Image (cartoon, rainbow, N blue to C red):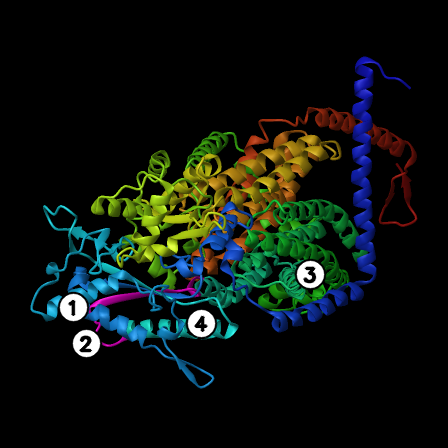
Amino acid sequence: MCFIGGDGASASRILWRMLRQVIHRGLKASFYWLGLFVSRHPVFFLTVPAVLTIIFGSTVLSRFKPERDLEVLVAPTHSLAKIERSLANSLFSIDQSKHKLYSDLHTPGRYGRLILLARSGGNILELADQVLQVHKQVLELRVTYKGFNYTFAHLCVLSHRDKRCLLDDIITIFEDIQQAVLSNSTFHKVPLSYPNTTLKDGRVSFIGHQLGGVSFSPNSRDQQVKFARAVQITYYLRNHGPVVQDIIAERWENEFCALVTRLSTAEVPHPTDQLHIHSLTSFSLWRDFHQTGMLSKGEVLVSLVLVLLAATISSSMRDCLRGKPFLGLLGVLTICIANVTAAGIFFISDGKFNSTLLGIPFFAMGHGTKGVFELLAGWRRTRENLPFKERVADAFADVMVCYTMTSSLYIITFGMGASPFTNIESVKIFCQSMCVAILVNYFYVFSFYGSCLVFAGQLEQNRYHSVFCCKIPSVEYLDRQPTWFKTMMSDGHDLSTHHDSVPYQNHFIQHFLREHYTEWITNTYVKPFVVILYLIYASFSFMGCLQISDGSNIVNLLASNSPSVSFAVTQQKYFSNYSPVIGFYIYEPIEYWNSTVQEHLKTLSHGFNKISWMDNFFHYLRVVNVSASTKSDFINILKGSFLRSPEYQHFTEDIIFSKNRETDEYDIIASRMYLVARTTEKKREEVVELLEKLRPLMLINSIKFIAFNPTFVFMDRYSSSVISPILTSGFSVLTILILTFFLVINPLGNFWLILTVTSVELGVLGLMTLWNVGMDSISILCLIYTLNFAMDHCAPHLYTFVLATEHTRTQCIKLALEEHGAAILQNTSCFVIGIMPLVFVPSNLTYTLFKCSLLTAGCTLLHCFVILPVFLTFFPPSKKRHKKKKRAKRKEREREREREREREREEIECIEVRENPDHVTNV
């Protein structure tokens, strides 16, 4: 059959509508039979999840392992910085040059670092004795391994020149100051300039990272230091060699931390009582990152107890027959055992724990309890006169279609977060674990909790008390008992004038929504204020979205009171004048003697503070009044004279020579110099900008070079790497909702869901930025969860409104709030109560998790109960069609009733029986 013009389009729409209805009814019928199957075999569906929990839960303790490599977790997995590190290490060993490649928090290998800060605003240069005493105690630290004693001298990085331990040049300066003081002089007699200073042996040393809080003498030409607040000293350990050496180095680091603790907590007076001491070692960041999980154990248990209480109270009613407090309790326990099973699966598959996984129990609880409360609400909407098995099946048919859709979207969004598109390993691990948790939750909700619902329904049908599980006495018996006994054993029939057809409406949340809130929010005078509120919400969200900040700083993931955080804060305050030392590696032969090449190199390094063999070499040529404009002169003077001078001998490590076998000449095949940029307190952001400016030059410049610092591994493309999971997840949700436009009964439901989720997501993003939350791995995971949390709560609400057949939009929104408002309020309140204890965990990670989760719950609740109930009364879908159909049906029913009454008047005989039973009157 061919349809032409408008008739064809109309027929096509009808066919699509019929197809959507068939799919919807087919899904409802499938879940009806699933509910019926569960209600007929409740013991099986109760036992299987319990056995699985015991099996997988036992593996959590036996296979628990923490992830110890912080770089694997938080640094971008694929980045050019890692390739550049490999290339730089192949030319010049990073382990041997890490004392030159200064990095704030990400120094490679084993090391111990001190910041010594003068108390009460004192001058650290006047405390040279105390500084050197601390230094002496560090050098004398001893660790024992298999009967042998090891000190720093056995473990330190050795100099190529004299095979002595490499120490910071600031130590030599303080020794000179001490000698000056002992000779009845002052430290001002020791020449000390900043940031470059000349040592006794003639070497020029950069001390910008070793001396902090510096002020200069007035009218000094070469910036002579008059005052300094802090000094930073690093002790580098070898990390190449046998495993035994690494074990000994780790023990030395532990002793190093113990020494700092003893010095910091010693009673006054003691030899170093005028110093504040902060320390950092190679494992400090991991220790303080892992400490978040350890610190939050108690708070997680408190959170569980609070959620259990909230679920129990919110599921209670005054009606002892229909109130289901234990079902709320069992619902939370269902999600708990599901999370234990998911954790067991994670550890069986060789997963390693990290503190970012702390959010999974809260996120899984937020989704799982939504399904639990929706099932409970679906049970309340079923007819009481049905057998309990059919009531369970009806609840499944009513709820599980939407719960399956939202669970599928959870798996899709977090599955995209676990895809190869994600470049942050901690985000990928979290998303993988979350997918498993959601899948297990879904299975446990319809099996374990469905069985609990079956048993509760059986108790209700047999008129057993919902708390004490005893038979409810008859009304006649209750009338003879005290008031307290009647209150405890009341079945709710005395709450109405007659036997209420829908006694479940006496639930306090539903009663509040039906009698008070829906009337208030749909009031004409309230709507303008809601519109103004939304405009304020949107403006603040937009303002926050314009101020999004990078959260690549590892401190955002550490325990807030940890030594690493206090070290980082002190370092940022006193040592933020200069960037980390950037290694400038020239990895191809160039004509160093060519004046054009020299000018090109000067252009590339313009604006930096340089530590360069080339600058010193040209200075040397000017001093000795020699020119080196040819290759032979350049190489001969460089190798034969310059690099043999004591003050320049250390530059031997910065040049790689290769001998030409044919001509017996030497070529420079690679070299390096060090660049340091002047920075401000926004040091990290400026270093990221610097890297972004240097990266294009590395690729297109005629001089082939790379710029590298260990910090770059954690910064390179971090912003794009951390944002990509939320972009892929959001795009996947948008695609799914658009593609299912033609599969849902009313496509406007999907349209409104897209708008609502977008509004919630942008609101959370903007407000969390205004709340000083940066874009790090935790906040990105929270934003992915926001997508799902908003869909989880708004989808049933919106689809009920769209499919409602009431006369007006206002009546439809009232119906949607009455049906799903109680479940939304119950779940959101449990979620917010559950995350409250996180405030008391002293960790930046949990603060971020709490802030984002609270904003997620708040924005979702605002849209479900304030914004949507008002805006849906303004915009499509229109309810006029349903109004006309309802009016026609009502008229038809009235006509039918009129005909019935006429037939009754004609056929029925009313007989009056008087006092005399033999006297019957026909009327």
Give yes or no for contact between labels 3 and 4 (Cβ–Cβ under 8 Å). no
Give yes or no for contact between labels 2 and 3 (Cβ–Cβ under 8 Å). no
Which mark, by number, is residue 250?
4
- Label 2 or label 3, whichever lies nearer to me, is 2
Dot placed on the residue nearer the N-terminal end, 3 or 4: 4
- Label 3 or label 4, whichever lies nearer to me, is 4
- Label 3 or label 1, whichever lies nearer to me, is 1
Secondary structure, mark 3, is loop
Dot placed on the residue nearer the N-terminal end, 4 or 1: 1
- Label 4 or label 1, whichever lies nearer to me, is 1
What amino acid is at disc 1?
Answer: Gln
Give yes or no for contact between labels 4 and 1 (Cβ–Cβ under 8 Å). no
Q: CA distance from mark 4 to mark 1?
A: 32 Å
Residue 220 lies, in percent from the top left, at 12, 47
Please give the residue where the numbered disc 2 appears in the rendered image. 269
Of all residues shown, which one is farthest toward the bottom? 147
> Where does the magenta region start and end?
266-285
Residue at the spot x=81%, y=25% of the render? Answer: 14
Residue 867 lies, in percent from the top left, at 53, 36
